[in-house]
Image (cartoon, rainbow, N blue to C red):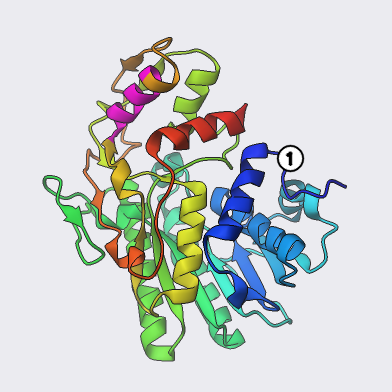
Amino acid sequence: MCNLESSNKIVQEDLEKMSCKIDFSYLQNSTVLVTGATGLIGSQIVLLLLYLNRVKNYSIKVIAMGRSLERLQKKFSQVLDRNNFELLEADVQNTINYDGKVDYIIHGASVTASKSFIETPVDTILTAIDGTKNMLNFAKDKQVKGFVYLSSMEVFGTVDGEPKLSESDYGYIDILSARSSYPESKRMCECLCASYAKQFDLPVKIARLAQTVGPGFKYDDNRMVVQFAKSVIENKDIVLLTEGKSKFCPIYTSDEICGIFTILSKGKAGEAYTVANSSAFSSVREIAEMVSSEIAQNKIKVVIQNNNSGQYPPSFAMNLDTTKLQTIGWSADVSLKEMYERLIESLK
């Protein structure tokens, strides 16, 4: 069995970088449960904790939770023999049964595919709300030291212009649109988290995540960031299914994960923190053109087909302000160009 946590060179480099960027010593000899452990962020959080055990002897018991034991075993096949590592097959939509102690929970289980928001909006809503309620009740029973709910930049909704958005700024969401099943349920889950913090004095915090760019995606993933990267690898034009006017602040995977752990250790209960790279604020089209010109050296071009079909949200501008998270000791280090360069390298 390989000694490293990942056979992906970029992922392994990022684990080393994260271990040095912030202080994880508060996790020593504790138990951390991660839901959505086979997902993009959850899986790398699990690998980071296992890296800390191997390199820094932190003796963290890591519980990777997911709906399918087979998927968990496949995802973590390289580290299944590690001490203090446990796979937990459980669905967040059901009551969670686990007899051992749990000190910290990072709750990332969620429906994430845009297509699902349209085709199965009820499932999207119930997975979010029932799943978060069950995890909060589980956290209350275990008297955890910390809980982070992974929310989304989509809770901000649609705003006019390009104002800097702090955590208390909200725009419009059409609650009668099936596509709103995702942002609206995320909003409700944030309210649920804040309510548990208030009523039960539960140390639950909220991480509002911007769009992730970096290693951890599967090659066949259909999300925009992967499509851009594959266009470079396969020497094919980048095809946009919208005008590409939406603007946001993407963030590199390792910067995002460090933000989550900063919130876990230093965030205030019942509060939300935006995790984004504000210096990377760009439109979809601007990002596509940057990838085409600066990374692909103009060997590919950007083509607009404008065939939305309701799958994507209306054009928006999310100029996210991360001052609140920065004040508790976090910063984003990886530039927009480097995000895509490392994503492309990781996919090859």
Residue drawn at (72%, 53%) of the image? 72
- Visible in this render: residue 96? no
| Most distant residue in the left direction | 161
| Most distant residue in the top direction | 299
Please provide the residue range marked out in magenta: 283-293
Residue drawn at (32%, 52%) of the image? 154
Whether residue 161 is situated above or below residue 259 in the rendered picture: above
**Front-lying residue, 67 or 166:** 166
Whether residue 239 is in magenta: the answer is: no
Predominant secondary structure in magenta? Answer: helix
Label count reads 1
Q: Amino acid at mark 1?
A: Ser
Q: Quadrant of residue 175?
A: bottom left
Q: Residue 93, position in %: x, y? A: 56, 66
Q: To which residue does mark 1 refer?
A: 7
Residue drawn at (36%, 81%) of the image? 195
Dot 1, how many residues are within 10 Å of its Cα: few (below 14), some (14-19), or many (20+)?
Answer: few
